[in-house]
Image: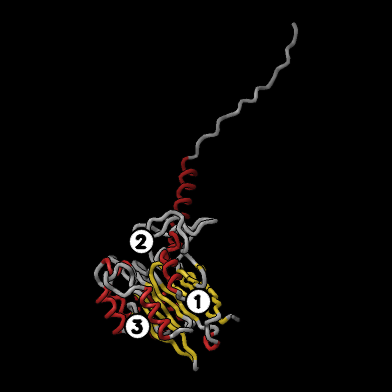
Amino acid sequence: MPRFPIRKCNIKRKKRPHPVRNLMIFFLLVLGFLLLTYLQNNTLTTREIPVLDSRIPREFDGFRIVLLSDGHGKQFGPGYSGLLRQVAELSPDLIVYTGDMADSSTELSGLPGLSRGLSNIAPTYYVTGNHEWEIRQVPKITRILKENGASVLQNQFVTLTRGKQSIVLAGVNDPNGPKDQKTPEQLASQIRNRYFNSFVILLAHRNNLFSKYAACGYDLVLSGHAHGGLVRLPFTDGLIDSQHTLFPTWTSGLYSLGNTQMVVSRGLGNIKPSFRVFNPPDIPVVVLHPKAS
C-alpha cells in the first residue's frame, strides 16, 4: 500500500481574554488621568518674565513684580498658606492682583489673612475683575483688603519711588463696574498730563482689551482673565478662554503691540466646573530692566 506523508497541522489557538488584566490596565489609566488632572490644577508654577523699556529708570533695574490673578475657587493650603509661602520665596518688590480674587464659591472670611499675608511680604495693589462685580461684593472685598494692608486702584494711579526716580502704577476697574466710571482713555490722559515722560504700568483684569490699552499709550499692562486658555495644546495660545473664544490669543506670557507690552498670568483658579489641562496655576514674576533708547 502506498504511504502518504503525515503532515502536522498547526492549529492556532485563540488567546483567551484576560478580563482581570484589562480591568487593571483601565484602572491604572483612569488613576493616571486623575493624578495628572490633580497636579495640573493644584501645583503652583512660577516663571520670570523680563520686560525691557527705555522709559524704565535705572533705579528700577531688576525691580520684581509678582503678578497674581484669578484666584477664585482656590486657596493652595489652609488660609492660603501655600500661596503665601510661594510668593515670599520669589522676593518681590511689589505684588499686584489683577482681579477675580473671589466668585460665588469663595469664602470671603479667608481674604483678610490673604491680604495681610501678601502685604507683609511686599506692597500689594489690587484691581477688580468681572466676578467680584457679578457677585456684588466689590465694596466688601475692597474694604477687607484696605483694612488688611493692601491698596485698591479703581480708575486711579499712584507713583512708586526708588531713590530719586519714580514710575506710575495705575489700575482700572473691570468693565462690569459702574457704567459712568472713568475710562482707561481718560485715566491715561490724566496721567500723561501730569507725568509726561514716566514709565506707566496699568493693572487691568481683561487681557482681551490689550488693543484698547495699547491705543491709550500705557507702557506695560499686567493682566489675567483668560485662564491660559484652560487647555493648552502645542502651537496654540490655549483652546478656549473665559469669553468662550476658541483658540484665543494674549493668554499667557509677554506680548507687544506698538510701544505697549503686556504680561498675562494664566491665573490660579478655575471657571467651575472646568479644569486645566497642561496649564498649571501660574505666578509670573515680571522683572523690569531699562533699555537704551
Q: Nearer the viewer, residue 175 or 90?
A: 175
Q: Which residue is mark 1?
A: 286
The image position of residue 279, as x and y in percent, is 47, 62
Q: Is residue 46 above or below residue 20?
A: below
Q: Secondary structure at mark 1?
A: strand
Q: Residues within 10 Å of mark 1 (few under 14, many from 20)?
A: many
* Residue depth check, mark 1 versus mark 2: number of the one nearer the observer: 1
Q: Which residue is mark 2?
A: 271
Q: Is 162 on the left or on the right of 151, as rendered?
A: right
Q: Which residue is mark 3?
A: 151
**What kind of residue is marked 1?**
Val
Mark drawn on residue 163: none
Q: Nearer the viewer, residue 62 or 279?
A: 62
Q: Residues within 10 Å of mark 2 (few under 14, many from 20)?
A: some
Dots 3 and 1: beta carbons under 8 Å? no
**What kind of residue is marked 2?**
Ile
The image position of residue 176, as x and y in percent, is 30, 67
Residue 76 shows in the view: no
Marks 1 and 2, how far apart at CA: 25 Å
Residue with the most extreme bottom position: 164
Q: Nearer the viewer, residue 34 or 293?
A: 293
Marks 3 and 1, how far apart at CA: 19 Å
